[in-house]
Image (tube, rainbow, N blue to C red):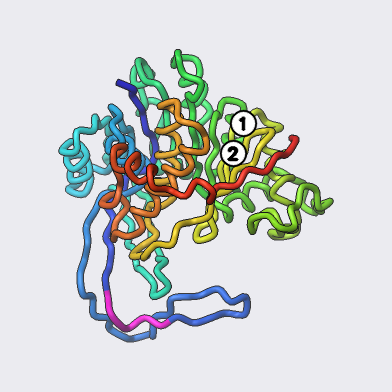
Amino acid sequence: MTKVLTIGAATQDIIIEYHEGLDVALVTQGTPHLAFKEGSKIEVEKLHYATGGGATNSAASFSQLGYEVTTAFKVGDDPAGTCIIESLQNEGIDVHAAVSKKEQTGVSFIIPSSKRDRVVFTYRGANTTLEQRDIPTTLFEQINCVYITSLTHKAADILPHLAYTAQKTISGSNLKVAVNPGTSQLTKNVAPLKATLSHIDILITNSHEMKLFMESLKPRFFKSTGAGTIADGPPLTRGILSYGKITFTLHEYLKEVFKYGVKRIVVTDGKQGVYVATKDQLFFHPSLPTEVVNSLGAGDAFGSCLVANLLRGKTIEDSIRAGILNASSVIMHHDAKSGLLTQSEINGYLTEFDNNLLTIYPHNI
């Protein structure tokens, strides 16, 4: 059986369900905001408790897809940490959890919006203290792939060691390291990620994180030449993107990241769809029409399912379709795990899937 190791954050997710008391206000850029009236008391209809964080979400996804999974993270010496460990073990996942005596287990308070998105208040806690000694090299033995999710604050410093160890230890696989970094790894603590890029087989970010990363990689006043735009292509390819004081195209972003040695690049774009790039092709698949309950965990569901299917030897096209199906199922549920599909369910859906939804654009990088 193929074995996968996931590494990253573990949190207790507390999902708040309410009917009224929060208003949506539009700012000048048209971005919806959740607004709390000062001094008000908001009635909560229900609370949903779940395990969350990139390491546990991806571990649950790989397990649902039929993989033998070990997940490694750090929790506090408290009931929340114990609950996360026991919940994953009950799902048949092998748990390697380091325990902090100083920091509490990470917690996320998740407030869904009327627009079917969410606001997350995150206390990262013990996740920030994950160290190299917390991830013994023995965990890399006899696995086929390591899937590394967000590493925050000082924990980000161990990324080069993790990726290098995986590349050195894993044999018989052409997809050894997949990385889905967190926001701080793309901005103020970008050096460890840059040092790791040559050891990454698949780099996964969303479209906002892509902008953050490009700003970190390029000079402060980088101006786009407009290279690689596709007038009738999907949204991110049609024109020049901007962030802060730089402008760039998706093509220029891909070219810059590929320069560091990454093999494949994924950019998820929420309701618009997902992009997967190799050096000579760009694949785009739009999101599926779905009744959205909560977008929590959609990125974890897509990325892990894409990797899982590629590890099985599926084509990149069918792996993208599988990831889209998994993410679409997850966002129909309150938490990040309840909607995860099995490989059998995905295979069944694929028999009736419209393969023409996926578009391939040749490019030369």
> To which residue does mark 2 refer?
265
Spatial CA span between label 2 and label 1: 7 Å
Q: Is residue 19 magenta?
A: yes
Above or below 97: residue 234:
below
Q: Quadrant of the C terminus?
A: top right
- In this rendering, would 359 be left or right of 251? left
Residue 263 vs 24, above or below: the answer is above
Residue 151 rendering spot, x and y as whole percentages = 45, 41
Rendered image quadrant of residue 279: top right
Question: For the magenta stretch, what is the residue range?
Answer: 18-23
Amino acid of disc 1: Val
In this view, the residue in front, 127 or 339, is: 339
Q: Secondary structure at mark 1?
A: loop
Quarter of the image that includes the N terminus = top left
Would you say the residues marked 2 and 1 are in contact, meaning their CB atoms lie under 8 Å apart? yes
Q: Residue at x 41, y 43 (%)?
A: 128
Q: Name the residue: 24% across, 29% down.
A: 94
Q: Is residue 160 visible?
A: yes
Residue at the right extreme?
225
Q: Can you tell which quarter of the image residue 252 is in?
A: top right
Q: Is residue 211 left or right of residue 304?
A: right
Q: Position of residue 316 (x, y in %)?
A: 52, 35
The tally of labels here is 2
Seen in the picture, residue 212 relative to 145 is either above or below; the reply is below
Label 1, on which residue? 262
For residue 242, the mark is none
Question: Where does residue 43 sit, x and y in percent of width and height?
Answer: 23, 80
Secondary element type, mark 2: strand
Residue 22: give x, y in percent of width and height: 36, 81
The amino acid pointed to by label 2 is Ile
